[in-house]
């Protein structure tokens, strides 16, 4: 990609105005995601810095996919802030999936704070080429 | 002469005023936050967003760098600050992929952070875990707070 070497700009973390009322204390953020689709699968990449693999919850019910990532406080108890540009908290995001997903083959991988979720489409949702016969 | 002792809006039961009241308390909260003396967001506007904390012994610099491997980072420390630079790479989706959403960004970055005191350059340590960079910068002896015992004059 040609735009790979451009300079990154700082973006504030997106705090959630959650559709669901939060019943737990703490902040909730929206992770930035990339979603791309091939004929066989939908791949979702989400930036969730500070979330360990075991603290991530992926829930797929009907057509709604919910990602929840819990983080722990980074700072020790005796540390006093000098400069604060970002805050930490839970990550939550929901997606509506239009295609039929083969739930048995979903793969999730967490590395360096990035989630890669591969949602393979069920066989009936994989498009077939239909050849049109000339009459 | 009749002087109204209670503000007029309390006497009028109009729902619009509670909205104004809410706005006022939001503004109060904002100003209270500024008065705390801590720089809150938005910060310097330079990637990556950074938090700096201190305790008696060390400064801690933390930044969220998801998807960046330790080897793609270049960190250098000077007497009173550090610079972090590197590149965030995002592997292209490949042939035939169609994007529904593209919010994550790739690119290079470079940032310099100046600390309020001198640091011990030799003992600085950096670690990356789960997409969070933590740089531990021990304070130089001269910067550390010292306990001074007060002698009582006999």
Image (cartoon, coloured by chain):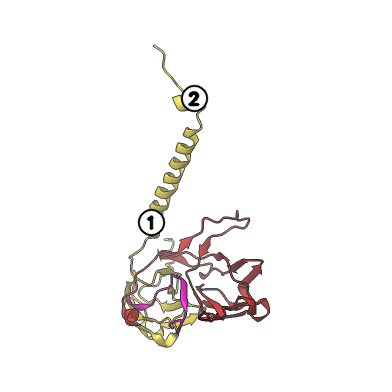
Chain containing the residue with disc 1: B
Q: Secondary structure at mark 1?
A: loop
CA–CA distance in space, label 1 to label 2: 39 Å
Q: Secondary structure at mark 2?
A: loop
Residue located farthest toward the right when viewing the structure as drawn: A104
How many C-alpha atoms fall within 10 Å of the one at disc 2: few (<14), some, or many (≥20)?
few
Rendered location of residue A123, percent (x, y)? 64, 80
Q: Is residue A96 above or below residue A22?
A: below
**In the displayed structure image, the side of residue A116 where residue B3 appears, left or right:** left
Chain containing the residue with disc 2: B
Q: Quadrant of the N terminus of chain A?
A: bottom left
How many C-alpha atoms fall within 10 Å of the one at disc 1: few (<14), some, or many (≥20)?
few
> Mark 2 = which residue?
B12
Q: Residue B100 lies in magenta, yes or no?
A: yes
Q: Which residues are magenta?
A: B92-110
Of residues A94 and B143, the one nearer the viewer is A94
- Which of disc 2 and disc 1 is earlier in sequence? 2
The residue that appears at 64% across and 77% down in the rendered structure is A124
The residue that appears at 34% across and 73% down in the rendered structure is A8
The residue that appears at 39% across and 51% down in the rendered structure is B35
Q: Residue B31 lies in magenta, yes or no?
A: no
Q: Which chain is yellow?
A: B
| Quarter of the view holding residue B86 | bottom left
> Mark 1 = which residue?
B37
The answer, for residue B78, to whether it is visible in the render is no
């Amino acid at each position: 990609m040609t735009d790979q070497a451009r300079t990154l700009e700082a973006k504030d973390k997106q705090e959630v105005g959650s559709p669901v009322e939060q019943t737990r204390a703490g902040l909730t953020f929206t992770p930035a995601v990339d979603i791309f689709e091939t004929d066989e699968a939908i791949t979702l990449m989400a930036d969730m810095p500070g979330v360990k693999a075991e603290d991530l919850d992926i829930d797929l019910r009907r057509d709604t996919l919910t990602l929840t990532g819990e983080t722990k406080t980074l700072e020790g108890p005796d540390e006093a802030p000098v400069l604060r540009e970002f805050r930490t908290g839970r990550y939550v995001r929901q997606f509506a999936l239009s295609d039929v997903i083969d739930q048995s083959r979903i793969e999730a991988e967490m590395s360096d704070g990035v989630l890669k979720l591969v949602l393979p489409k069920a066989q009936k949702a994989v498009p077939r080429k239909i050849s049109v016969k000339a009459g | 002469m009749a002087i109204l002792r209670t503000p007029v809006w309390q006497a009028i039961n109009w729902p619009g005023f509670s909205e104004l009241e809410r706005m006022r308390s939001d503004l109060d909260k904002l100003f209270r936050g500024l008065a705390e003396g801590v720089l809150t967001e938005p910060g310097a506007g330079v990637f990556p967003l950074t938090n700096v904390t201190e305790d008696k012994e060390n400064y801690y610099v933390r930044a969220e760098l998801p998807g960046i491997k330790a080897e793609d980072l270049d960190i250098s420390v000077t007497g009173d600050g550090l610079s972090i630079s590197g590149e965030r790479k995002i592997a292209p989706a490949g042939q035939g992929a169609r994007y529904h959403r593209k919010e994550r960004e790739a690119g290079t970055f470079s940032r310099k952070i100046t600390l309020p005191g001198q640091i011990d350059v030799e003992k600085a340590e950096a670690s990356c875990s789960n997409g969070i960079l933590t740089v531990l910068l021990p304070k130089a002896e001269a910067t550390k707070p010292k306990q001074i015992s007060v002698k009582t004059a006999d």
